[in-house]
Image: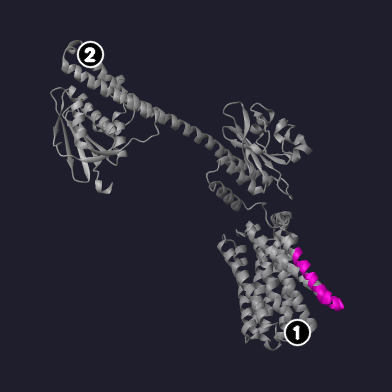
Amino acid sequence: MQGTPGPMVVGAASYAAAAIAFVVLTFLLATSWRGRAQGVRLIAASAMTAIWAAVLALQAWRGGLPAIVVYTLEVLRSAAWIAALLALAHGVLPRFVGLAAHTIWIVLLAAGWLFAAALGRLLALAGIVLALVVLVLIEQNYRNANASGREDFKFLAIGLGGVFAFDLFLYSQSELLRGIPADVWSVRGIVNALLVPLIAIAARRNPQWSLDVFVSRQAVVFTTVIMAVGVYLLLMSAGGYWLREAGGHWGTAANVIFFTLALAVLAVMLLSGTMRRRLRVFVSKHFYRNKYDYRIEWLRFIETLSAGGGEDSRRTSLRAMAEIFESPGAIMYTRSDTAAEYVPVAAWPMELAQVGAQRGVPVDHELVRFLAARQWVIDLKEYDAAPDLYQNVSLPAGLRSAPAIRVLLPLLRPEGLAGFVLLYDPPPPFELTYEDRDLLKTIGRQVATIVVQHDADRRLAESRQFEAYHRLTAFMMHDLKNAVAQLQLIVRNAEKHRQNPAFVDDTIATIGNAAERMTRLIEQLRDRDKAPVAQALDLAALVRAAASRCADRSPAARLDGIAEPVTVHADADRLTTALEHVIRNAQDACEPSNSIVVSLSNDGVRACLTIADTGRGMEPDFVRTRLFRPFDSTKGSKGMGIGAFQVREYVRSLGGDVEVQSSPGSGTRFDIILPVFDHRHA
């Protein structure tokens, strides 16, 4: 070689960059390989190039590597790519072409080992010959491919062709200068590294190679920007050098001004949204089969939907849709609940009130029928130019009050048209292609599901409000029924006992109790969102009072061990009502000859109130499946079926529970378990 191959650091960094780039490429190819020969040969060629670059980086950094090792690696690297190209052209090129190509590199490799003294001349000769073989094979692959195959193969032709075209230039210069140019040798690794993305894209675009390489568009855009900036800076450096040399006394000043302006122009281009959009369009059009990276777009769409932050789901859907196409705004129409028309219900990023007067579209309008039947995405720019493409369907007069509206997207569900979206014109360059239409249709179906779910959630919330009101009403009616039963009992006994002072006193007390209950019910109905007032209560005293009020019927409850006070934290009226309900249910299940025993136990943490009767009892299946089911009564029209449910729900709200044991003919045991109230922790 002529001198040393470039500065030590430059050469080492250059080939190290190439080694890293080809290691990454090898990893991508290996993890994406699907088992075909073309794929494994591409992997081998990439791996061989990574080894070649790593060894040359070591040689540039430390030196001392035998020349025969460099020569062997040069030949084997080219041989690996020859084998890969022959595998891609399998069945296309005559067999003798492959045989000749393999023979050439084998002969050159053997010559290097046999004539080690002439390695300097042999290296240049081998480099030129092998570069020509690779370039010819690239040309033959490209020439023999069909139109679509050429479109996909061109990236490999550019990337790999660039690598070996540089080799051809390098070794041709070596022949002319009688030695390898050190500077050109040093930057060779960088050239190889910069062309790796094109090889990766070629593998990604050719599934017949059984390689499914994922190269993100962001990475390609980033790499393209870096390369473009590098070329730009090189050109500016050349211009600055010329100004400095040709400018005389003003050369340095002109150079500084030139570089300042050049950097300002570069900053403007890098920060320009239009430039970024044009670059993304260029990358998508020329480097990928598809316009969109659907994985990235779908993940971003879902992320936007899930990050709504409590915002109206319809508005969030518009934002997610508009961001994919970089549209400045969108309006959504859905079916009205009160009229037979589609009306605007959401807008983004503006509020719906800021959109202006947007009239509804009748459900029998020609546009609605067209969208439901054809399921087409309407490009309004295309519609204006050629309405016959859309069967000359008429558009409502007020639909395009905003002139910037570009796309009309139907929101389709299996049961029909859920609505439609008006999408504002994205910034240029934008052309609505079949890929845009397919993506819009897919997103439209997802948004239609969200719209339907939004309506279903709203209706469910309304039904829950009605359900809560009906349940409250049922509870009120249950308590009113008990109060009415007391008053009816007084009326039935009044004729017989009206002259009895004790009966009159008891009647007054009963009427007072009923009036108090009704007043409490009215207050609960008026302030139904107000929670009952809980306080420390003596459970034993409440049990005695409830048993006393139920003593007007037989069998009367017998108290056992109710003397000791037990403090619980509850609302006195609601807990007393619950206790009375359980005792009266036991009386309903008993004959006068049966017995009811009420007992109370306390372990300091939980109190257990037991109401045990020897009445008819219940089937275990009834206890398990029907006893606590609301509105399921065994008393016919006389019962409401919510008493047991009401008791259990209130006891559970206090932190307790209700347990029932029963069997037919053996009676029932009702255990009400409540936490004991500790004043020290109040």
Rendering coords of residue 272 (x, y %) = 72, 57
The colour mode here is one colour
Does 296 lie within the magenta span?
A: no
* Left or right: 26, with 129 as reference point: left
Q: Nearer the viewer, mark 2 or mark 1?
A: 2
Q: Which residue is mark 1?
A: 179
Q: Main secondary structure of the magenta part?
A: helix
Residue type at numbered disc 2: Arg
* Left or right: 52, with 540 as reference point: right
Residue in the picture at 77% in, 37% down? 384
The kind of secondary structure element at disc 2 is helix
User: Relative to 373, does residue 512 appear above or below in the rendering?
Assistant: above
Lower position in the chain sequence, tag 2 or tag 1: 1
Residue in the picture at 24% in, 33% down? 620
Residue 621 in sight from this viewpoint: no
Q: Mark 2 and 1 residues: CB-CB less than 8 Å, in contact?
A: no
Query: In this orientation, which residue lies closer to the viewer: 179 or 480?
Result: 480
* Left or right: 302, with 432 as reference point: left
Which residue ends up furthest to the bottom in the rendered image?
A: 117
Query: In this orientation, which residue lies closer to the viewer: 191 or 33?
Result: 191
Does 251 lie within the magenta span?
A: yes
Q: Which residue is mark 2?
A: 492
Rendering coords of residue 345 (x, y %) = 60, 35
Rendering coords of residue 639 (x, y %) = 30, 23
Q: Which residues are magenta?
A: 241-265
Query: In this orientation, which residue lies closer to the viewer: 616 or 206?
Result: 616
Residue in the picture at 63% in, 85% down? 63
Which residue ends up furthest to the top in the rendered image?
A: 495
Image quarter of residue 654? top left
